[in-house]
Amino acid sequence: MDTLAGLRAMFKRGKHSPRSRSRRDPERDVMMHVTLDAQHVTPLREALIRDCGDQQWTIRVAPLGGTDRVRLSLYLPKGEVSHAIHRVTLLSPTAEVGRMLEIPDAPSHAWHNLMRSESGHRDHAVPHAEEAPIENQPVSALLSGKHVLLGLDATDRQGLFVRLGAFFEDHCGMPGATVTEALAAREALGSTGLGQGVAVPHGHLQFLSQPLAAYVRPASPIPFDAPDGQPVSDIVVLLVPEWANSTHLHLLADVARRFCDHHFREQLHACADAHAVCDLFAAFDALEPRRAPVPFDSAPTSIGGERR
């Protein structure tokens, strides 16, 4: 699910200044759904990166079970919609373009409910009200010393995912092969490497009732096909229930908030043990003012709210 183009752009620009958070684009975003073959997702994502430039946009990917097709939720500036449809038509003539909705300037209860209903097949599994108790947890609340893996031996992404599957099986009683498959399936849609040596591999799992996280510092940096070409040495792994889309976005945004701060990254590299890593994640929450979440598997924009 999701591409990470927006967060990658944030890494290039550095941490946002306070005044940038108050700037509002005069043009509203539009949400549109597209169903197409999975093989066309990466070319479309790359085309949108080129076409939209530094404009804010989001693409979310939901595989359609039992098929080789996926359902995209695109959040684009209104002026880019026609270009996006043209790109989709060129890349995938068999694509199906669904309805389009204009995103309001300020989020309302009705809009939030719509976002949940529009998130696809995951929402019917568990009523969205059950998501509320975990929705605003920072990633630090999910990290304990046992979930910090320093010096993990893995030479490539698949090897990392296999090791993570074994870890979650040993420590959480989860089927390791399923964890590995979920992480690999998401990675196949596009690299979760962000640049600056950071990656956020993530996946949805049907049997989970609460989100899980782990921080990994591999023994040697791992090639991740990141946009800047740098191998990855800071890895935050997120596993969330299949129905928990907004929780997923919140956690991704929380990771973005931390790793866009180069001081945090420098301090993290200086942490010599798991306890120090957990303390740093917790200290960041205490010192950094809370900001509205930035759903970053994509563009640095808050769905239905003020842009960042």
Image: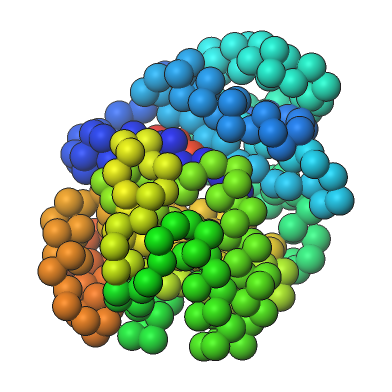
The x, y position of residue 136, in whole percent, is 46, 66
The relative height of residue 219 versus residue 111 in the rendered view (above or below) is below
User: Is 78 above or below relative to 282?
Assistant: above
Q: Which color scheme does this rendered protein use?
A: rainbow
What residue is rendered at 79% in x and 66% in y?
A: 125
- Where is the C terminus found, in terms of image quarters? top left
Q: Quadrant of residue 102?
A: top right
Q: Position of residue 88 (x, y in %)?
A: 68, 19
Percent position of residue 99, x then y: 77, 27
Residue 244 shows in this picture: no
Q: Residue furthest right?
A: 66
Q: 47 or 152: which is nearer to us?
A: 152
* Residue 44, above or below 93: below
Left or right: 109 as drawn, with respect to 224: right
Viewer-closest of 259 and 183: 183
Q: Position of residue 50 (x, y in %)?
A: 45, 18
Instruction: Give the side of residue 6 with respect to residue 80, left or right.
Output: left
At a point 60% along the width and 43% down the height, the residue shown is: 189
At a point 55% along the width and 79% down the height, the residue shown is 166
**Quadrant in which residue 60 is drawn:** top right
Write down the quadrant of residue 30 in the picture.
top right
